[in-house]
């Protein structure tokens, strides 16, 4: 069995977004209110043990929800256990708005139909990491710039 790899999925954010308008980013977003009330505490590292802790599960569920919302990806057989911990981004202490961004990888079959979320996402792009970082005309957020070369 061999996976056919299309590349890495990036979403182009709407020009109307406050943060990184028009930038290519990994699919994802904020925890919603329900997720925040589910015993959430901020992560300072991503546990890599066999059983994710409860706060990591909150992030994993949110990652799958955001992927579905932003790209219309649906696969009933995908679970939070299928997400591979990739990295954790935290804004610097000196910035007025701080956030934790755990990044997970998921292998999506090349036959999966995907559509961008109207209003928030302008378009979807399957790019190799080299295509992303070598094109100076693309606006790319820092986590994607730093994490993408590792995927090469």
Image (cartoon, grey):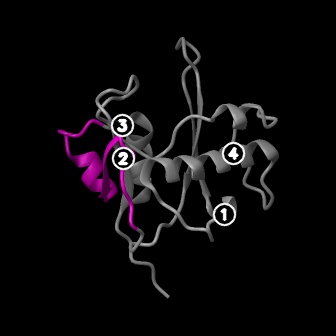
Residue under numbered circle 2: 11
- Residue 137 appears at what percent x and percent y? 17, 39
Q: CA distance from mark 4 to mark 1?
A: 17 Å
Residue at 43%, 53% in the rendered image: 71
Looking at the rendering, the stretch of residues picked out in magenta corresponds to 113-139
Q: Are marks 2 and 3 in contact (CB under 8 Å)?
A: no
Mark 2 crowdedness (10 Å alpha carbons): few <14, some 14-19, many ≥20: many
- Which mark is drawn over residue 79? 1
Q: Observer-nearest residue: 149 or 109? A: 109
Residue at 55%, 67% in the rendered image: 75
Q: CA distance from mark 4 to mark 3?
A: 31 Å
Q: Quadrant of residue 94?
A: top right
- Disc nearer the start of the sequence (1/2): 2
- Disc nearer the start of the sequence (4/1): 4
- Disc nearer the start of the sequence (3/1): 1
Q: Quadrant of residue 109?
A: bottom left
- Residue 105 appears at what percent x and percent y? 53, 57
Q: Is residue 133 magenta?
A: yes
Q: Nearer the viewer, mark 2 or mark 4?
A: 2
């Amino acid at each position: 069995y061999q996976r056919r790899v299309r590349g890495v999925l990036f979403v182009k954010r709407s020009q109307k977004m406050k943060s990184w308008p028009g930038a290519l980013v990994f699919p994802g977003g904020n925890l919603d209110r329900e997720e925040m009330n589910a015993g959430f505490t901020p992560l300072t590292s991503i546990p890599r043990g066999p059983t994710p802790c409860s706060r990591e599960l909150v992030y994993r569920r949110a990652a799958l929800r955001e992927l579905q919302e932003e790209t219309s990806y649906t696969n009933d057989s995908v679970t939070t256990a299928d997400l591979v911990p990739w990295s954790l981004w935290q804004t610097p202490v000196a910035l007025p708005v701080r956030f934790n961004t755990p990044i997970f990888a998921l292998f999506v079959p090349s036959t999966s139909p995907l559509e961008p979320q109207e209003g928030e996402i302008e378009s979807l792009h399957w790019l190799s990491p080299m295509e992303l970082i070598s094109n100076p005309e693309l606006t790319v957020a820092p986590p994607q710039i730093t994490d993408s070369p590792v995927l090469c």
